[in-house]
Image: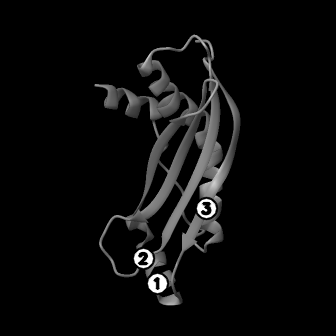
């Protein structure tokens, strides 16, 4: 498969860790297994066949608790799409699958660093994300 895009640059637009107080910190530390990683991907066309892709990581409590910590990171990736790419489905696959597979290891490392530096050093993401599987599932 030939590469039909090129990553021009990427940067962290926003990074946030919010734990309002010590009681919440200890509560969350004991309940962190209820937290789930959620990834949102948005894109915006730029000039000259460039696309801005925002990959947003959120780590949040899946249960309704009054005491919560909030973690979020937004990474921006600018890609240049090959001139030959005209099909919308092919462009979607580049944005939602190909680019994500390429950048995910670095994003995961950065996000885990945020969580560890926020006092939650035991957190690991055991399950790797299958972007291709998710894309194919979405397409069907």
In the rendered structure, the answer to whether residue 10 lies left or right of residue 34 reads right
Q: Quadrant of the N terminus?
A: top right
Of the two numbered discs 1 and 3 on the same chain, state the one appearing first in sequence: 3
- Assess whether mark 1 and mark 2 are in contact (beta carbons under 8 angstroms): yes
Whole-Å distance between the Cαs marked 3 and 2? Answer: 17 Å
Residue at the spot x=47%, y=42% of the render? 42
The residue to which callout 3 is attached is: 15
Q: Nearer the viewer, mark 3 or mark 2?
A: 3
Residue 131 horizontal/vertical position (percent): 46, 34
- Assess whether mark 2 and mark 3 are in contact (beta carbons under 8 angstroms): no
Q: Nearer the viewer, residue 22 or 79?
A: 79
User: Which label belongs to residue 24?
Assistant: 1
User: Which label belongs to residue 68?
Assistant: 2
Residue 40 horizontal/vertical position (percent): 45, 47
- Assess whether mark 3 and mark 1 are in contact (beta carbons under 8 angstroms): no
Element under label 1? helix
Whole-Å distance between the Cαs marked 1 and 3? Answer: 20 Å
Element under label 2? loop
């Amino acid at each position: 498969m030939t590469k039909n895009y090129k990553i021009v640059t990427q940067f962290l637009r926003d990074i946030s860790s919010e734990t309002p107080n010590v009681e919440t910190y200890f509560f969350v530390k004991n309940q962190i297994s209820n937290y789930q990683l959620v990834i949102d991907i948005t894109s915006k066309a730029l000039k000259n066949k460039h696309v801005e892709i925002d990959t947003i990581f959120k780590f949040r409590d899946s249960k309704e608790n009054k005491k919560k910590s909030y973690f979020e990171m937004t990474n921006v990736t600018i890609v240049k799409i090959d001139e030959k790419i005209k099909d919308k489905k092919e462009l979607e696959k580049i944005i939602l699958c190909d680019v994500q597979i390429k950048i995910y290891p670095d994003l995961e490392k950065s996000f885990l660093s945020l969580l560890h530096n926020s006092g939650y050093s035991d957190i690991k993401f055991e399950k790797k994300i299958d972007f291709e599987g998710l894309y194919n599932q979405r397409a069907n």
